[in-house]
Image (tube, rainbow, N blue to C red):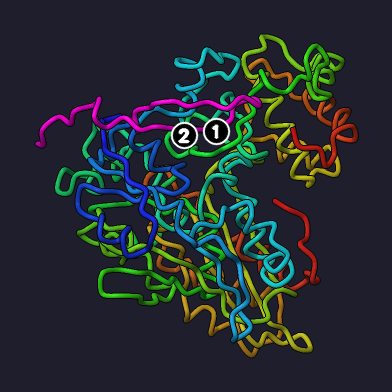
Amino acid sequence: MTPFSYHKPASLDEAVSLAGPSSRFIAGGTNLVDLMKENVERPEHLIDITGLALKAIEETPEGGVMIGALVSNADLAWHPLVEARYPLLAQAILAGASPQLRNMASTGGNLLQRTRCYYFYDTGTPCNKREPGSGCPARQGLNRMHAILGASDDCVATHPSDMCVALAALAAVVHVHGPAGARQIPFADFHRLPGDTPQRDNQLAQDELITGIELPAEPFAAHCRYIKVRDRASYAFALVSVAAALQIEKGVIREARLALGGVAHKPWRDPAVEALLQGKPASTELFTHAADALLQAAKPLAQNGFKVSLARNAIIRALSEACAADNSLGEMQ
Amino acid sequence: MTATPDQGALQRPLQMTINGEHKTLTVHPWTTLLDLLREQLDLAGTKKGCDHGQCGACTVLRDGKRINACLTLAVMCEGAELVTIEGLADGDRLHPMQQAFITQDAFQCGYCTPGQICSAVGLANEGRAHNRDDIRELMSGNLCRCGAYSNIVAAVEEALPLIKGARP
């Protein structure tokens, strides 16, 4: 690692005042320290935010839940409020990383983890995300793990998070704090597509800090399912993952949420496809129709064409199992 | 390019408890907990496998929770209570998880074993493993290249009832 100075601010404002182009915030460090070892990240100043009071999980006056940015992934997945009201989120978190990493990784940091594209990690190769303008070897190279939706000529990387796929489906709200004060970002707007600026993963400004994630009070607990397909049974990044959440009344879908992981630069949601599911009786035909509609725009690369059929099958299965689910956590993937 | 910082001036004081012993230390901010243990404190039982949080050989217990020491900056452990493989036994009496690994012959080369055992003690503290499938899933952060997995699962299963709710 390149030498850096270490700071541990005692307040949010102090933390934000220390931010700058050569600084990085650190909480769990599970991704940042790794990137620093690989020389992908070389901050001159590290700002340890673990002393800030952002560690609570609390009910909001509106009946939702507010998750402090420093809550660990493990504590979040196993919190009684999350297990009872947002089992989709618990399923997604427990499908990701390892128990050790989940004990370390923070909720806010999970949103900010970088792609696991091999070329992004390998400083011996070009990468537009790491070094804007240098090129994208993945487009013509090893791209089995890469995006099939929303990619650009400059970048075909995917967002690696499982948690974020569930947060997208649950329409979470990201609370951030910066020099100008606090603001809220709807989850769908938080991460961005690569376009010609793939170096920017999200809408967060350099001097802004995530303080919490708010889950709205929506009744998706009874019918939800997170399915993750990967190269081994556990502890691997998703080839494709699907978060499906439904509100069903007498066999008719009242509200539908569908988010995909492992297929794009951000958790992929298509409001038109969700609208297509709403107001219709749940059936395999309907789910198949939704899957085909969502994947219509898919543009697979040389090595990841299999992701299109994998995603299609995973969507149909996730929606079917969400439909059939009861109020329990269900079998973990 | 920026000037090379004065590395000595960047050192930080650090106080933590390691295996029950209070330590007052000085560390560079970029020293990982793993390197602190192995290089500065001669606690070489914690192993460096991949050094990237992928193999679990460096697993230790911080405040009773299992973590990867290789991805942990030592400077961020101020005030922590750390337990490594060297701190699990009570004198000459092995921790039940250590004893179970011997009874079940849960290793071959032994390199991953300290991490496996610390991880399994963390698993016991969590109280979420109720059957062999749970154990397999919740031990997936520890790789064993010898492939002793079936005996590792048996060892964890044997020790679990003996240490449930216990915190080392």
Write the start and end of the magenta stretch as one range: B1-29
Q: Which mark is residue A134?
A: none
The chain holding disc 2 is B
Q: Position of residue A281 (x, y in %)?
A: 71, 85
The residue tagged 2 is B71
SS assignment at label 1: strand
Q: Position of residue A56 (x, y in %)?
A: 58, 64
Q: Amino acid at mark 1?
A: Asn
Q: Is residue A96 above or below residue B85?
A: below
SS assignment at label 2: helix
Image quarter in which the N terminus of chain A is found: top left
Q: Is residue A168 above or below residue A230?
A: below
Report how far apart the C-alphas of labels 2 and 1 lie in the structure: 6 Å
Q: Amino acid at mark 2?
A: Leu
Residue B95: which quarter of the image? top right
Q: Which mark is residue B68?
A: 1
Closer-to-camera residue (A278/A220)? A220
